[in-house]
Image (cartoon, rainbow, N blue to C red):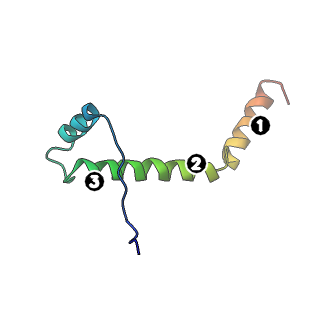
């Protein structure tokens, strides 16, 4: 029976790897993999949050209506 892996491999260009390696020197990140995982989690989280967010808040809507009224459109 095959065991389930917790991780997979993602390839990035060597030049990017080297840039990240230099970037994380003297930080709390112990590896490029750890840093890339952190960044990807942040990006995915932000994307997921924006997917469910209303495009305008009620305050935004009120300001838009007021602005349109002042411009004579309403």
User: Crowdedness of circle 3 by 10 Å Cα count: few (<14), some, many (20+)?
Assistant: few
Residue 63 x %, y %: 70, 38
Q: Marks 3 and 2, Cα distance to the nearest angstrom?
A: 25 Å
Residue in the picture at 25% in, 34% down: 14
Which residue is disc 2 drawn over? 50
Residue in the picture at 73% in, 31% down: 67
In which quarter of the view is residue 15 placed?
A: top left
In the picture shown, does residue 24 fall above or below 18?
A: below
User: Residue furthest toward the left?
Assistant: 26
Which residue is disc 3 drawn over? 34
Which residue is disc 1 drawn over? 65
Q: Nearer the viewer, residue 42 or 61?
A: 42
Q: Nearer the viewer, mark 3 or mark 1?
A: 3
User: Crowdedness of circle 1 by 10 Å Cα count: few (<14), some, many (20+)?
Assistant: some
For numbered disc 3, what is the local secondary structure?
helix
User: Crowdedness of circle 2 by 10 Å Cα count: few (<14), some, many (20+)?
Assistant: few
Residue 36 x %, y %: 32, 47
Q: Marks 3 and 1, Cα distance to the nearest angstrom?
A: 47 Å
Residue in the picture at 21% in, 39% down: 23
First of labels 3, 2 by sequence position: 3
């Amino acid at each position: 029976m095959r065991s389930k892996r917790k991780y997979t491999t993602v390839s990035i260009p060597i030049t990017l790897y080297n840039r990240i390696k230099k970037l994380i020197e003297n930080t709390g990140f112990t590896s490029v993999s750890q840093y890339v995982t952190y960044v990807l989690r942040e990006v995915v989280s932000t994307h997921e949050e924006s997917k469910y967010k209303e495009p305008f808040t009620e305050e935004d809507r009120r300001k838009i209506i007021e602005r349109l009224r002042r411009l004579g459109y309403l």
